Image: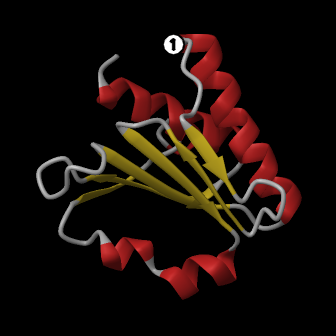
Amino acid sequence: MDSDKLIDLAAEACDDRKAKDIKLIRVDKVSSLTDWILITEGLSDVQVRAIIKSVEDKLKDKVNRLPIRKEGVNEAKWALLDYGELIVNVFQPNERRYYELESFWSHGEIQTYESSANQG
C-alpha cells in the first residue's frame, strides 16, 4: 500500500468526523520513523474517540490495515494510531498547543488538508 494513499484515507476519515486543522507532514526524507505524520484535533474526548474510530474503520474497510499500536484512546486527550508508514495523532486543543508536534516536525513537508466540503 502506497503511504500517500494511506494518508489520504486517514485524512478523509478525520474530516468525516469534523476534525479541526488537519495537518499532513511528510517526514520520510528527514526521519526513518515513518513516512507521514497526521496531526489533528477534536474538541472533546468523545470527538477524539470518534475520529480515531473513523480512521481505524476506514483503513480496515478500504485497505485491510490495522494499527500496529494505539495509545491514549481511553483518556482521549491525545490519541495515537501507528500504522508503520503513517502515524495519526488526534489531540484536544490544549494538548495540541502544549506538545506542538507541528513545530517538532517543522523540517518535514507540512500540508494542510482541505476538506472536500470546502473545495466545491
Query: Does the rendering let one see residue 62?
Result: yes
- Disc 1 marks a residue whose amino acid type is Val
**Label 1 Cα crowd, 10 Å radius (few <14 / some 14-19 / many 20+):** few
Query: Does the rendering let one see residue 17?
Result: no
Where is residue 45 shown, x and y percent of the image? Answer: 84, 63
Where is residue 84 shown, x and y percent of the image? Answer: 40, 37
Position of residue 40 in the picture relative to residue 85 (left or right): right
Where is residue 97 shown, x and y percent of the image? Answer: 55, 84
- For this orientation, the residue located farthest to the front is 69
Front position in the image: 100 or 43: 100
- Which residue occupies 67% across, 83% down? 94
Front position in the image: 75 or 20: 75
Please count the marks in the image.
Answer: 1
Residue 48 found in image quarter: bottom right
- The image quadrant where one finds the N terminus is top left
- For this orientation, the residue located farthest to the bottom is 98
The vertical placement of 35 against 77, above or below, is above
The vertical placement of 8 against 44, above or below, is above
- Which residue occupies 84% across, 56% down? 74
The vertical placement of 64 against 70, above or below, is above
- Which residue occupies 50% across, 28% down? 9
Where is residue 89 shown, x and y percent of the image? Answer: 55, 57
SS for callout 1: helix
Front position in the image: 9 or 29: 29
Mark 1 lies on residue: 63
Residue 78 found in image quarter: bottom right
Position of residue 17 in the picture relative to residue 35 (left or right): right
